[in-house]
């Protein structure tokens, strides 16, 4: 999938009116049917099936639907399991660029990733209560980088109690394994399934404390797809399975060098010290010329988080890279405005660019995570920061810094809220 882009100067973009808020439209059944058919080819390839659990408790709807986020296949799954039922999707605002009318007619509710949006709750309530449409939300907001569940907002239970509709959870199996974000959109031959389960009825929501609701949600989003692959003996024998693995395993645990690992073919190699690993057909790491420090990809990723925490603690954490800059101001285009530098340290983000005209700062407490993505709209890896009025998309020109920035942003947020690294 690609996005409409346009080259404009920073001054011209900043003169454009900001995004106009609109109430969600009632989803078009015709467009939903067309979308389901159009996306259905992907599901046929993966022999998709869905197991329904306790769905009799959910009634006829509308429902508040939560779904974990692994790959673009998630969208095809949503349209298939909701066949014949109107539903709106909480989506990122960039999804509307160049096609706002179409996406709104599908019932889409645009919002900005990891940016506070006070209108989102009222929009979801409007879709549920007035449009009588279910609302599908990916509370993780971003795709999983390492195949484990990513952070979901704290006290999500408050929102669910306020909306007073049955809560349904859709959990996918195989979607990440087929198309992990780091692997350059190269798809593997994997069967994909899902479960669809009613977690709470309105009565259960009313009689359950927020803390207990959040505990149920935390368990529902506690996933490890590399372990799932191994437990179910899912063989991935594609010769490109390690392509791009350096995007998440960016730090060598042998020489401690960052940005020198290279994932290509079936191997991950540190170009600094030569340490070589193979990603086998079950997704396990095997040391070729070294005793492996890690055999499980998420364990390596978790260790990198620990390393970042040490840097934050001793005041040495810093990212400072040149980048190309794009701005999302409205739904007409993504505006390419020039070059700059992205700086991130214990004090948060600083973005400077466009010959000194652009200067933006963002404190650690602004968001619980960072919008980090790979090969975003087939342009490049990105880190996105900003506000509801203006989002900045930074395309780093050097280093595999995207995963590190997300991890650091999450840890700095916890510290800003007085939490330990083990707390969410």
Image (tube, grey):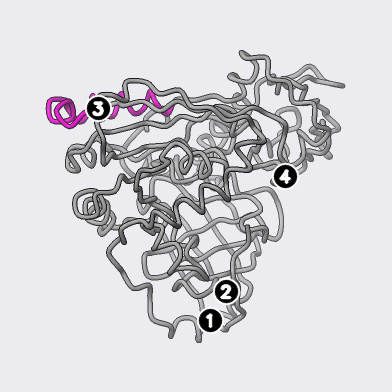
Question: Callout 2: helix, strand or loop?
Answer: strand
**Foreground residue, 296 or 85?**
85
Residue at image location 73% in from the left, 42% down from the top: 186
Residue at image location 63% in from the left, 41% down from the top: 42
Spatial separation of the CA atoms under disc 3 and disc 4: 45 Å
Which mark is first along the chain, 1 or 4? 1
The number of numbered discs placed on residues in the rendered structure image is 4
Q: Which residues are magenta?
A: 200-221
Mark 3 Cα shell of 10 Å, populated few (<14), some (14-19), many (≥20):
many
Measuring from the top left, give residue 422's x and y in whole percent: 41, 27
Which mark is first along the chain, 4 or 2? 4
Residue at image location 42% in from the left, 41% down from the top: 83
Spatial separation of the CA atoms under disc 1 and disc 3: 48 Å
Which mark is first along the chain, 3 or 1? 1
Measuring from the top left, give residue 59's x and y in whole percent: 24, 31
Measuring from the top left, give residue 55's x and y in whole percent: 32, 25
Which mark is first along the chain, 3 or 2? 3
Question: Callout 4: helix, strand or loop?
Answer: loop
The residue at which mark 4 appears reads as 259
Q: Which mark is residue 10?
A: 1
The residue at which mark 3 appears reads as 200
The residue at which mark 2 appears reads as 353
Q: Nearer the viewer, mark 4 or mark 1?
A: 1
């Amino acid at each position: 999938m690609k996005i409409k882009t346009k080259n404009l100067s920073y001054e011209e973009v900043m003169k454009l009116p900001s995004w106009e808020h609109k109430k969600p439209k009632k989803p078009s059944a015709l467009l939903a049917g067309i979308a389901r058919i159009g996306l259905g080819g992907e599901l046929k390839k993966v022999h998709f099936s869905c197991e329904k659990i306790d769905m009799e408790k959910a009634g006829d709807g509308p429902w508040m639907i939560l779904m974990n986020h692994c790959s673009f296949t998630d969208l095809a799954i949503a349209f298939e399991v909701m066949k014949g039922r109107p539903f709106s999707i909480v989506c990122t605002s960039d999804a509307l660029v160049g096609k706002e009318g179409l996406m709104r007619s599908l019932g889409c509710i645009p919002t900005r990733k990891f940016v506070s949006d006070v209108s989102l709750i009222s929009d979801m309530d409007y879709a549920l209560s007035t449009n009588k449409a279910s609302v599908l939300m990916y509370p993780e907001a971003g795709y999983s980088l390492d195949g484990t569940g990513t952070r979901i907002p704290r006290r999500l239970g408050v929102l669910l109690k306020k909306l007073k509709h049955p809560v349904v959870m859709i959990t996918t199996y195989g979607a990440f394994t087929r198309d992990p974000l780091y692997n350059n959109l190269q798809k593997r031959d994997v069967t994909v399934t899902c479960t669809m389960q009613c977690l709470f009825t309105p009565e259960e929501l009313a009689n359950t404390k927020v803390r207990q609701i959040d505990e149920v949600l935390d368990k529902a989003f506690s996933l490890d797809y590399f372990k799932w692959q191994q437990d179910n003996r899912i063989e991935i024998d594609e010769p490109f399975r390690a392509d791009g693995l350096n995007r998440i395993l960016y730090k060598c645990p042998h020489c401690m060098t960052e940005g020198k690992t290279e994932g290509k073919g079936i191997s991950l190699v540190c170009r600094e010290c030569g340490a070589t690993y193979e990603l086998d057909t079950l997704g396990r790491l095997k040391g070729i010329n070294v005793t492996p420090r890690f055999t499980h990809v998420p364990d390596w990723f978790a260790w990198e988080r620990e390393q970042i925490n040490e840097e934050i603690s001793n005041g040495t954490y810093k990212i400072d890279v040149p980048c190309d800059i794009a701005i999302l101001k409205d739904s007409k285009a993504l505006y390419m405005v020039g070059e700059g530098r992205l700086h991130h340290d214990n004090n948060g983000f600083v973005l400077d660019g466009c010959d000194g005209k652009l200067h933006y700062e963002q404190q650690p407490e602004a968001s619980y995570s960072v919008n980090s993505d790979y090969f975003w709209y087939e342009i490049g890896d990105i880190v996105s920061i900003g506000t509801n009025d203006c989002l900045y998309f930074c395309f780093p020109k050097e280093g595999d810094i995207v995963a590190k920035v997300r991890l650091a942003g999450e840890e700095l947020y916890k510290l800003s809220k007085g939490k330990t690294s083990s707390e969410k």
